[in-house]
Amino acid sequence: MDFDLKEEHKMIRDMTRDFAQEVIRPRSEEIERTGEYPCDIMDQMAELGMMGIPFPEEYGGSGGDWVGMHVCIEEISRGDMTLGALLDVTTSIVAQELYVFGTEEQKRQWLIPIAKGKEIGAFGLTEPNAGSDAASLRTKAVLDSSEWVLNGTKQFITNIGLDNASIILAAAVTGKKKGGQNIISAFIVPKTAPGFHLGKRYDKIAWHGSATHEVIFEDCRIPKENLLGDPQRGFAQHLEVLQTGRISIAAIAVGMAQACLDESVRYAKERVQFGKPIFHFQAVQFKLADMAVAIELARNQYLKAAWLKDQGRNHTFEATAAKLFASEMAEKVASDAVQIHGGYGYMSEYPVSRIYKSAKVLQIVEGTSEVQRMIIGRILAA
Ligand SMILES: Cc1cc2nc3c(=O)[nH]c(=O)nc-3n(C[C@H](O)[C@H](O)[C@H](O)COP(=O)(O)OP(=O)(O)OC[C@H]3O[C@@H](n4cnc5c(N)ncnc54)[C@H](O)[C@@H]3O)c2cc1C
């Protein structure tokens, strides 16, 4: 058994840590305050090869693996969650679905620009009436000679509003099985397709740098060739890549929690009350100790899930446990970090206040905590 990161993973960690601390962290307050996506940072991440770490070079990637990808996501999220989530949605989910299920033609056309970071992909599963019960989605796709015609609405879609977002991978009903259940297929829908409409931008509690939009397909026409993978297994394909997304959410959570610990240790050593730095009060030190332990456990869990994925082994339990534990841990750590900062922790200029507000979303996206427990419950029941 070897718990050490390999040299290539350490290189990724050190490179992304330096980048996140020097370039991203100082911009985090501005990103949240203005709600403007830091496109210039995204371009730099692309140049450093971060957008396609786990894919072969012939498809625009860096020839790395999923452990490396997630080490990168943790460090980037330690600088700002918005950019960690970019890697999650675009690389772990969209690019992976294109890589695993796409035809050679589709990979050349859509995967390469995304893996190189020239374009961004969005993922469209959730609908107004289909969230946790994603299989009840109502968007329909009908084949009309050489084109698929899509009608329906997707909601809460991350990153589709960005100028360089090129496609959304959308799930749609294409028929019925013998037993009456819907057949769900996956489609590559370019933003430029006729009948594609970018709907409203949602006003969120926090995480303002990441735009979340509604997407409306109104007789939206795409070429027949834009069907992705097996037409009978579109839903299963989406779920398969979401499993990696869950490892990514765990890595984001660990990065955010680590940032809270960094800030809290620094603050506690500087802030003097009752004649000494508050770090020396046991009540404060115990909080810091609990934070450090929880972060390390969550980190070990996401790394194990990513490592199993790299081995081609089943990791449903490990990825689900990583997402559940890390997302709940991040909210608690962020809350304790605000507490350690006292009144200053409630002020927007302090990083812990922003992380506290944003961390909640990690328990909701890509399957709520309840859904993660349902998956684990099913594993226990088997
Ligand atoms: C900021 C943001 C970005 C997002 N980005 C994307 C995106 O890019 N693409 C995308 O497709 N989706 C995206 N989502 C959607 C997200 O995945 C869903 O919000 C999530 O899956 C939950 O669905 P819902 O909101 O409809 O809640 P619901 O499913 O309505 O759940 C409401 C509550 O009921 C609970 N619940 C539901 N069913 C059960 C059950 N059987 N047992 C116990 N409890 C249950 C849930 O856990 C939750 O607490 C995003 C959401 C947010 C907030």
Image: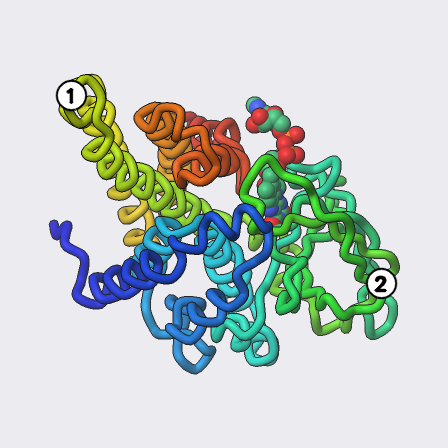
| Residue 145 drawn above or below residue 181 | below
Left or right of residue 180, residue 145 in this image: right
| Residue 297 drawn above or below residue 213 | above
Q: Label 1 sits on what residue type?
A: Gly
At 44% from the left and 33% from the top, the residue drawn is 356
At 77% from the left and 73% from the top, the residue drawn is 223
At 71% from the left and 64% from the top, the residue drawn is 189
- For disc 1, the marked residue is 275
Q: Give the image quarter of residue 55.
A: bottom left
- Regarding mark 2 in the picture, which secondary structure is present there? loop
| Residue 177 drawn above or below residue 297 | below
| Residue 123 drawn above or below residue 50 | above
Q: Which mark is residue 195?
A: 2
Q: Residues within 10 Å of mark 1 (few under 14, many from 20)?
A: few
At 80% from the left and 65% from the top, the residue drawn is 148
The nearer-to-camera label among 1 and 2 is 1
Q: Label 2 sits on what residue type?
A: Gly
Q: Give the image quarter of residue 104.
A: bottom right
Task: Give the quadrant of the C terminus.
Answer: top left
> Which residue is farthest front?
275
